[in-house]
Image: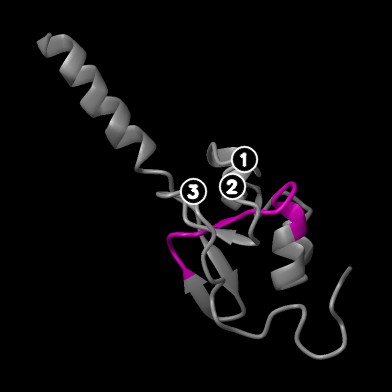
Amino acid sequence: MIVGNSITIILAALTTSAYAICHIGTSIDMNCCWGGAAGEDACFRQQKSINCGNGIEQANFCKNIGIDRTRCDADCCDPRTGWGKPCPKGKNACDGTNCPN
């Protein structure tokens, strides 16, 4: 029984330690992952950065930390809860007239 409880505690610690960051301009949220269909799409909608598609932001895609679109299809998600959350404040890609489709 002690071994079973120890394994449960270790697994709980590992699942709550998902680490991902969303940033838009100089605004950073240290508890955030890019949601959407593939992560890349949400990242691009918010940042419109080449980093969304070249692999640099890939570690911050929700799908890569175990949160798929059925849990969170918002652009920004909380890795601890798997729920959508407000994206960091900042000038995102949809400000002005250059909002991607």
Which residue position is annotated with label 3? 82
Crowdedness near tag 2: few (<14), some (14–19) or many (≥20) residues, C-alpha within 10 Å: many
Q: Quadrant of the C terminus?
A: bottom right
Q: Is residue 16 above or below residue 90?
A: above
Pointer 1 and pointer 2: residues touching (CB < 8 Å)?
yes
Secondary structure state at the residue bearing disc 3: loop
Assign a secondary structure to mark 1: loop
- For label 2, the SS is helix
Quarter-wise, where is residue 3 in the image?
top left
Per the image, the residue denoted by label 2 is 62
Q: Residues within 10 Å of mark 3 (few under 14, many from 20)?
A: many
Residue sticking out furthest to the bottom? 96
Residues shaded magenta: 29-41
Residue shown at the point (76%, 78%) measured from the top left: 93
Look at the image and name its color scheme: one colour
Identify the residue position indicated by label 1 in the image.
68
Amino acid type of the residue tagged 3 in the rendering:
Gly
Q: Which comes before the other along the chain, label 2 or label 3?
A: 2
Outermost residue on the left side: it is 2
Give coordinates of residue 24: x percent, y percent: 61, 75
